[in-house]
Image (cartoon, grey):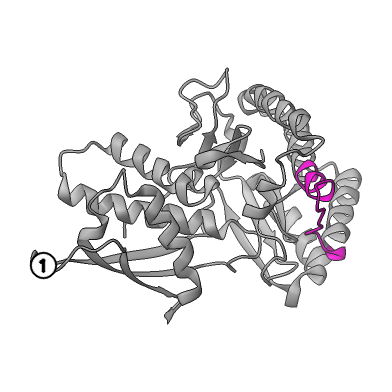
Amino acid sequence: MKYWGKKENQIPANPSISFTLDNCKTITSLEFTRKKDCEKKGDLFDFEFYFEGKKKEDFKPKIYTFFERIEKYCPYLKEYQFTITSENSFPHSSGIASSASGMSALALCVMSLEKQLAPSISEDYFLKKASFLARLGSGSACRSVQGNLVVWGDHAEIVGSSNLYGVEYPNEVHEVFENYQDTILLVDKGEKKVSSSVGHNLMHNHPFAEERFTQAHKNLTTLKDVFKSGDLNKFIEIVESEALTLHAMMMSSNPYFILMKPNTLEIINKIWAFRETTGLPVCFTLDAGANVHVLYPKKYKTEIFQFIKNELLAFCEKNQFISDSVGLGSKKL
């Protein structure tokens, strides 16, 4: 379920829920050296950032903004010099939640430092604050700290749900959703033309925004029954509707924009035709980009993956894809 539109301080305009993936991940390390007492602490954060082995000055402003946002919750940050190194197992800035993955990893690194400073903090506090901090870097990052199914945003029927951090879905989940598969078709690995931050801001004064937010609450209520019963037909209906609604909001904002590519639509139509012909429970979802996530239960992997190879890879950039499945959230290496 999609989150699109936010208020001040990274508060979501609607609740959302997502599976955490296993193979698509960010690996981040935070090396730190405490400044000597004789050195001036200064008013600036002191860090270097390396992405996939190379110093990346153009990434630093986003990290600096993140540190500014979290400083009042982590007042020790200016007391250290940091070296941040990060790498992704998937293309960044192409609409596969790279900022969510990256910011959650960095937030966890910051909390690991805090754990050294205050060893008595509990695991629950550690994870909740990591999710809280991650949200201030990238809203959906708060859903990437834990797994496998995470809710973010206040919802009247989800106990413990919060606008401030993600929580593991607390209700019953049918076994069909265990090891659910996600084959990510890389239609366009390039950087998307409109950032998610810009897209979220265009929901302000959007003519259909309020109806969309109401729809999201209703869909999450329906998903409660779906997760309990394992009703895949209803699951597919909600997942695909949410994906298309997300892009419909982009196309009807002012200014309007389109992130899907012709091959995105070709893949969607192929999936619909295959599902109609075979009756197999395969569906698609989209993030804020052109790439397509093909979702299906593990028990049907042989047939559906064969279909993907035979009919869908031709629409991908250099036939590239990522095989993934539901994961268990972050871990310390």
Q: Is residue 94 above or below residue 271?
A: below
Residue pictured at 17% horizontal, 66% vertical = 40
x and y percentages locating residue 171 in the rendered image: 52, 23
**Disc 1: which residue:** 36
Look at the image and tell me whether residue 147 can be seen.
yes
**What residue is at 52 percent from the left and 42 percent from the top?**
10
> Residue 202 placed where, x, y %?
72, 47
Quadrant of image for the C terminus: bottom left
Residue 248 is one of the magenta-drawn residues:
yes
Label 1: state its secondary structure. Answer: loop
- From where the camera sits, is residue 328 visible? no
Q: Which residues are magenta?
A: 244-263
- What x and y, as percent, mark residue 329? 44, 47
Number of callouts: 1
Q: Is residue 99 left or right of residue 209?
A: left
Name which residue type carries label 1.
Lys
- In the image as oriented, which residue stretches furthest toward the bottom? 54
204 is within the stretch colored magenta: no
Q: Is residue 268 above or below residue 280?
A: below
Q: Residue at x 74, y 78 (%)?
A: 318
Q: Quadrant of residue 24?
A: bottom right
Q: Which quadrant would residue 12 be assigned to in this image?
A: top right
The crowd level at tag 1 (other Cα within 10 Å; few <14, some 14-19, many 20+) is: few
* Left-right relation of 3 to 89: right
159 to the left or right of 46: right
Asked if residue 239 is positioned above or below residue 155 in the image, the reply reads below
Instruction: Residue 181: give x, y in percent of width and height.
Output: 63, 50
Question: In terms of depth relative to the viewer, which is nearer, 221 or 156?
Answer: 156
Image quarter of the N terminus: top right
